[in-house]
Amino acid sequence: MPVTRNIELAKEVYWAPEVLFLGWATDTILERAESRSKLAAKRIRQLIDESGGRLSCSPAKECQAFQVNLSLVSKQFKRLYRTTIRAYSRRIRMMTAEKLLRESNNLNIDEAARALGYSFTSAFSRCFQNTFGKRPKRYQMQRAASAQQEIVDESIKNPDAQLQI
């Protein structure tokens, strides 16, 4: 009785050599595709970071260069960074926009939008508001007002220093 039971178990576990080869071949192909897609995802993130999230960065072109499918790279990007390529690019773009507006008091909002690749200032403004909770012009004005207030506060603390406005 125990011998027949072992034979039945062996029949359940036994796979034909063709099935094993196909499984190995499929695994090998998937590993290569996954490693190429992982490299492409990392390269796309690097390009987004280097470009400041500008819209000129094209994930599709990078996928062609790596000879891998864009949807596969998108899945790999989401698996690696827990966000989509588009959302990551938008976040980096808005951080760049915030830095531009913070560091340049006389920068026009339209110029900032165009510098980041937006054709329409309204689209840029809407995206900025969704990210930071206020329109870019209002953000810029509040930053300028707070910077002037800091200068005034500093001059009150140190009356011998020259007032620079």
Image: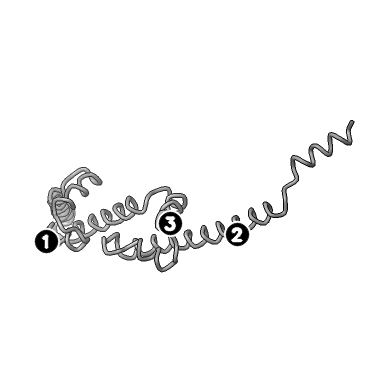
Q: Amino acid at mark 1?
A: Asn
Q: Earlier in the sequence, mark 2 or mark 3?
A: 2
Residue 58 figure quarter:
bottom left
Look at 35% across and 61% down and name the residue there.
59
Residue 156 is at least partly visible in this image: no
Q: Give 85 or 27, whichever is nearer the viewer.
A: 27
Look at 47% across and 63% down and name the residue there.
39
Q: Amino acid at mark 2?
A: Thr
For the residues labelled 3 and 1, the Cα–Cα distance comes to: 40 Å
Q: Amino acid at mark 3?
A: Val
For the residues labelled 1 and 2, the Cα–Cα distance comes to: 57 Å
Residue 73's disc is: 3
Look at 23% across and 55% down and name the residue there.
98
Left or right of 18, for residue 54: left
Q: Earlier in the sequence, mark 3 or mark 1?
A: 3
Q: Which residue is mark 1?
A: 106
